[in-house]
Amino acid sequence: MACDDQRPTWDEYFLMLAKLAATRSTCLAFPVGAVIVKNKQVVATGYNGSPSGSAHCTTQGYCYPGLSSCDASKTLPSRAVHAEANAIAQAAKHGISTDGASIYVTLEPCLSCLKLIISAGIKEVFYETAFNAGEKALVRDSFVNEGLVILKQVKLSESTAKRATDLFLLFSTSVVGSDMLQIR
Ligand SMILES: [Zn+2]
Ligand SMILES: [Zn+2]
């Protein structure tokens, strides 16, 4: 077998980038990362966190005083800008078109983000973890059935995850003389 057999698929590649973006999340609710991709090129990234310039939930140690999570209150709106919204905002800020793009997210978009994704012209959503249930799933499915957006769950294969961790994340990459691409 050729040694490039172990390379991640495009879906795995962009999902891994979304996972890395999630490591920068600043909200205590949960880490989420997003990557907008057009023609196999990353055009913007985002993660779950308070608006630019606002105190991070992780720095404060709470989202709101007495609230451990931005999603814990029924009345207070979340402080966090969701990863997908941050990625779309980043593209807008830099004048990059998202029309016809795809988005990779570590968590299935909430309905607010899904509406934003559709209005931003993003056609495909690849997510790792399912999120919407019940009536929210019905609304999501109506968008899908209207042909507004395609949603697909994607997973990282264990071998790709292990290879990325053991050979690239845990140790220095691109070390001269190493034979990391040949290791099985
Ligand atoms: Zn928060
Ligand atoms: Zn959202």
Image (cartoon, grey):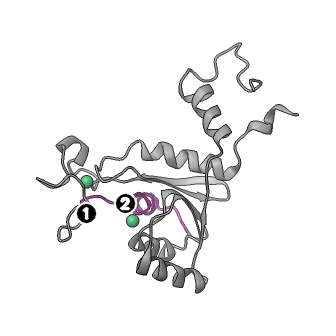
Q: Quadrant of residue 67?
A: bottom left
Which residue is under mark 1?
Answer: 78
> Is residue 40 part of the magenta span, yes or no?
no
Q: Residue at x 43, y 77 (%)?
A: 134
Which residue is under mark 2?
Answer: 82
> Is residue 88 part of the magenta span, yes or no?
yes
The quadrant the C terminus occupies is top right
| Residue 3 image point, x, y percent | 81, 31
Amino acid type at circle 1 is: Ser
Which residue is most to the front?
Answer: 134
Ligand 1, image quadrant it occupies = bottom left
Under circle 1, the secondary element is loop
Asked if marks 1 and 2 touch (Cβ < 8 Å), the reply is: yes
Is label 1's Cβ within 8 Å of ligand 1?
yes
Disc 2 residue crowd, few under 14, some 14–19, many 20+, Cα 10 Å: many
160 relative position to 99: left or right: right
Q: Is residue 152 above or below residue 68?
A: below
Amino acid type at circle 2 is: His
The quadrant the N terminus occupies is top right
Residue 102 seen from this side:
yes
Residue 56 seen from this side:
no
Which residue is most to the top?
Answer: 177
Is label 2's Cβ within 8 Å of ligand 2?
yes
Q: Which residues are magenta?
A: 79-98
Q: Residue at x 44, y 58 (%)?
A: 87
